[in-house]
Image (cartoon, rainbow, N blue to C red):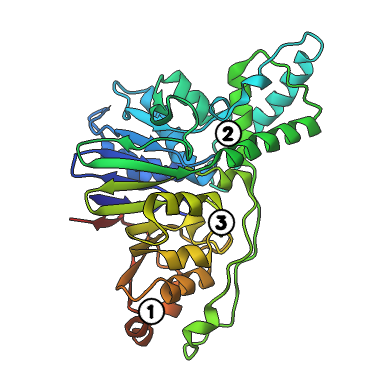
Amino acid sequence: MKIKMMPAQYGDCFWIYTSDKINILVDGGLKSTYNHWIKPLTFFENRYELIFDLVIVTHIDCDHIGGIVAFLEDCEKNCRVGLKEIWHNGLFQIGGKKFLEYSERDVERDEEILNAIIQRGYLSSEESNIGVSESFALDVLIQEKKVVRNTGNKNSAICDKTGEYNLGIVTKILVLGPDKESLNAMEKYWQKEMIARNYRFQVTNRVKLMQAFEFQMSAVNNYYAPFELQISGKDCMERYLSDLEEKDISVTNRSSICFVIEEGKYKVLFLGDAVIYNNGSLMKRLEEKYGKTCHFTAIKLPHHGSRYNVSIDFIKRYTADEYYFSTNSERFGHPDIDVIADVIYYSGTNNKKLIFNYPLDVIKLFDRNDWKQQYHYEIVVGNGNEIVERSYE
């Protein structure tokens, strides 16, 4: 198994190639991620020569879906669509069919509200925002391109009830989340936001409803202050530890598709921007499938190593040879110092590696030989201009 960790700025984009010759793309980063990294590696002589067997969009957030939107937009210009199947939970997978109704009295007003949301498009800090003038929502593009969707759960939402999904002879995916409660929370949030706009849920245009839902949910962001301490080269590791008790309340992050890709003895855990807390559904699902403790080949930490998305209990019980920190740290200061310290301190005595795809300032604090020897870790750092590739053989 080989995993390419793309320089996706503050976003996520992972390309997995298995011994079954299966290509999987997990999230697409920003639009620029597609242009700079995905397209040059897949597109030759005016056609897609490499086809992704599965694209997994963990949740609705611009730093995860922007590159996938650009990918699907590009497909219409070329003679081959570059993917076989996509996992993406849109409005009607989550359960929004009840919002598609009709009333002569309210439909005009509801259309105006949807149009206003669609006109704004995705909210992104990228220089070239993905707006309505450039694209439809990803949900709509999937439908327009007739891409096979969510066969892992019979076209319904990919969630913790999804069964084991075999991609090849030895490659399989085990879905851990989200749970139905998290998906319902996103639907309720959408409903509350629309009611606040005096929306009556009376509309005949399914496409507009799908677009407005995705654009509105992509705007759900909660800012959390990073963990800050005075940094000194003479400090002990314990100074940077914390209990990680505060939790991310974003409904979109909670809805992240979380899964394990297994290939023989190798198990890689991808957590999107999920929220992990003691006795939460993810911990229960992990315990159900892997026991009270388990050692993984690699763990992609949730939300770029945010202190609001992971727990001490998780770090202690579910360890790995390698930990992925995917971000250039330009948004919200991820990863947090205390998450890095807690992973080093609490994740056992195995010789673990911390993998970064950008040369972040925070890495310098932990790049000390005395600490590396004492706590049994190494640091692998990308330069931000090249793909970081990990190989498990």
Q: Amino acid at mark 3?
A: Asn
Q: Pinpoint residue 377: horizontal percent, then vertical percent.
A: 33, 75
How many numbered circles are shown? 3
Task: Please give the label number shown on residue 279.
Answer: 3
Q: Is residue 33 above or below residue 153?
A: below
Depth check: give the residue in front, 208 or 19: 19
Q: Residue at x 54, y 61 (%)?
A: 306
Separation of residues labelled 3 and 1 (CA atoms): 34 Å
- Kindly identify which residue carries mark 2: 131
Q: Is residue 240 above or below residue 25?
A: below
Q: Amino acid at mark 1?
A: Asp
- Give residue 107's quadrant in the image: top right
Q: Tell me which label, 3 or 1, sits earlier in the chain.
A: 3
- Give residue 381's quadrant in the image: bottom left
Q: Dot 2: what SS?
A: loop
Label 3 Cα neighbours within 10 Å, binned few <14 / some 14-19 / many ≥20: few
- Kindly identify which residue carries mark 1: 367
Q: Residue at x 62, y 59 (%)?
A: 247
- State which mark lies toward you, 3 or 2: 3
Depth check: give the residue in front, 26 or 278: 278
Q: Is residue 21 above or below residue 306?
A: above
Question: Which residue, as the protein is rendered here, is positioned at the far bottom?
Answer: 234
Q: Amino acid at mark 2?
A: Gly
Q: Dot 1: what SS?
A: loop
Label 1 Cα neighbours within 10 Å, binned few <14 / some 14-19 / many ≥20: few
Is residue 361 among the parts visible in the rendering? no
Q: Pinpoint residue 342: horizontal percent, then vertical percent.
A: 48, 72
Q: Dot 3: what SS?
A: loop
Q: Tell me which label, 1 or 2, sits earlier in the chain.
A: 2
Q: Is residue 347 above or below residue 262?
A: below
